[in-house]
Image (cartoon, rainbow, N blue to C red):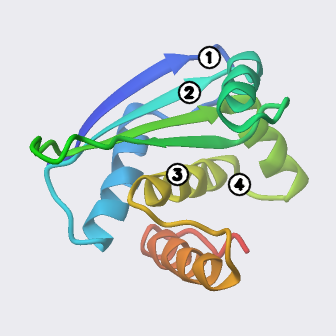
């Protein structure tokens, strides 16, 4: 494994993916994008922390599924740190149930989605969204997971 994963568990919600599963999903994204030797933090939180972060950083007063905080090193510093993902366990579980998806498949999608955000992908414009979704579906397919869209 060439990815350094800082897996932070700040939730007692269950079930959540194992560190090995998260590592596999992150590495699937990096491999798809031709990257190696990267570092990423994935923090699993409860709704309270997720809501506070969403409020502080996006001015939205509710918990969301995944927040991405890309790391921007100064120009003279070469660091392979992508940034931080914060994933709210309760929101992911609720979405999976509402959308009739297997819970761990939805977790995989959220980790992949967030990691792509750290790599600079976005879905604000329709063309960007289509590109990002196409990449997500391809990576999920490689993992044996159906198209979430």
Residue 11: assigned label: 1
Left or right of residue 33, residue 147 in this image: right
Name which of mark 1 and mark 4 comes first in the sequence: 1
Residue at image x 60%, y 35%?
87
Left or right: residue 76 versus residue 123 is left
Which of the marked residues, 1 or 2, is nearer the chain's N terminus? 1
Rounded to the nearest angstrom, the CA distance separating label 1 from label 2 is 6 Å
Camera-nearest residue between 4 and 125: 125
Are the residues at dot 1 and dot 4 in contact (C-beta closer than 8 Å)? no
Question: Badge 3, how many Cα within 10 Å: few under 14, some, many 20+?
Answer: many
Task: Identify residue for label 4.
Answer: 102
Between marks 2 and 4 in the image, the one whose residue lies nearer the viewer: 2
Q: From the top left corner, tell me how far across and down residue 94 is, in percent.
A: 83, 40
Q: Residue 63 location, x and y as percent?
A: 78, 32
Residue at the limit of the structure toward the right, as seen here: 98
- Label 1 crowd (10 A; few <14 / some 14-19 / many >=20): some
Disc 3 target residue: 114
Where is mark 2, residue-wise? 44
């Amino acid at each position: 494994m060439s990815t350094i994963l800082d897996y932070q568990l700040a939730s007692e919600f269950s079930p959540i993916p194992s560190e090995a599963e998260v590592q596999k999903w992150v590495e699937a994204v990096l491999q798809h994008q031709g990257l190696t030797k990267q570092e990423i933090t994935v923090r699993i939180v409860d709704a309270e922390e997720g809501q506070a972060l969403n409020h502080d950083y996006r001015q939205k007063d509710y918990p969301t599924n995944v927040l991405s905080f890309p790391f921007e090193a100064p120009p003279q510093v070469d660091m392979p740190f992508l940034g931080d993902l914060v994933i709210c366990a309760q929101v992911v579980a609720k979405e999976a149930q509402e959308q009739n998806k297997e819970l761990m498949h939805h977790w995989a999608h959220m980790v992949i989605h967030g990691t792509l955000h750290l790599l600079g992908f976005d879905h604000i414009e329709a063309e960007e969204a289509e590109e990002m979704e196409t990449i997500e579906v391809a990576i999920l397919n490689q993992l044996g997971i159906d198209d979430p869209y």
